[in-house]
Image (spheres, rainbow, N blue to C red):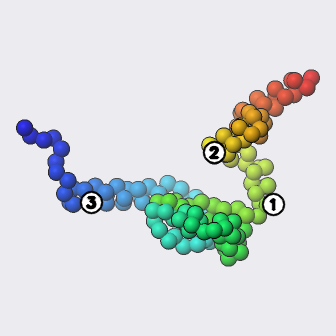
């Protein structure tokens, strides 16, 4: 009986992985050319980015504070697999960003679950048009 699956050898394993890696890097390079390159810590590891450094530190806030003191209130940190995260540590900049760009900011699933569990499905939990429905319902109940 002839097997349809060929034997795994270094050549037929590494070549597709290398091609996939190059395609991924090209996609990441060309997918978002409009974001400016910000100052930030160097990438210690392509796979983990700075996640390993942050998670192994005793005080994660001090790590971000050290980077904010060195690179300024707005900087970027290397993320996993060549991605990047923009960190904003200035309270006025965060307020401005969240007040002007409310429909584009989407909370994480973890933060939404936390808010829903402790505060219920209210206006804090709502996003996009759910926010408007929640406001309209609260106004109707008040009248």
| Closer to viewer: mark 2 or mark 1 | 2
Q: Which mark is residue 142?
A: none
Q: Residue furthest bottom?
A: 70
Q: x and y percent of residue 1 in the render?
A: 7, 38
Cα separation between marks 2 and 1: 25 Å
Q: Quadrant of the C terminus?
A: top right
Q: Residues within 10 Å of mark 2 (few under 14, many from 20)?
A: few
Q: Quadrant of residue 78?
A: bottom right
| Closer to viewer: mark 2 or mark 3 | 2
- With respect to residue 129, does 112 lie above or below? below
Q: Residue furthest right?
A: 143
Q: Residue at x 91, y 26 (%)?
A: 142
**Label 3: which secondary element:** helix
Residue situated in front as seen by the camera: 7 or 15: 7
Mark earlier in primary sequence (2, 3): 3
Cα separation between marks 2 and 3: 36 Å
The residue tagged 1 is: 92
The residue tagged 2 is: 110
Mark earlier in primary sequence (3, 1): 3
Q: Residue at x 41, y 56 (%)?
A: 24
Q: Which mark is residue 14?
A: 3
Q: Residues within 10 Å of mark 1 (few under 14, many from 20)?
A: few
Name the side, left or right, on which 112 lies relative to 84. right
Q: x and y percent of residue 8 in the render?
A: 20, 53
**Label 1: which secondary element:** helix
């Amino acid at each position: 009986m002839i097997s349809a699956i060929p034997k795994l050898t270094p050549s037929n394993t590494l070549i597709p992985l290398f091609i996939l890696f190059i395609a991924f890097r090209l996609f990441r390079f060309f997918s978002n050319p409009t974001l400016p390159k910000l100052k930030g810590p160097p990438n210690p590891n392509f796979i983990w980015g700075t996640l390993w450094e942050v998670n192994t530190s005793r005080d994660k806030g001090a790590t971000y504070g050290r980077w904010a003191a060195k690179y300024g209130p707005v900087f970027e940190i290397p993320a996993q697999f060549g991605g990047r995260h923009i960190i904003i540590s200035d309270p006025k900049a965060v307020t401005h960003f969240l007040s002007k760009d409310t429909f584009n900011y989407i909370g994480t699933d973890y933060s939404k679950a936390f808010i829903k569990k402790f505060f219920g499905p209210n206006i804090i939990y709502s996003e996009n048009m759910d926010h408007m429905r929640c406001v309209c319902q609260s106004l109707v109940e008040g009248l």
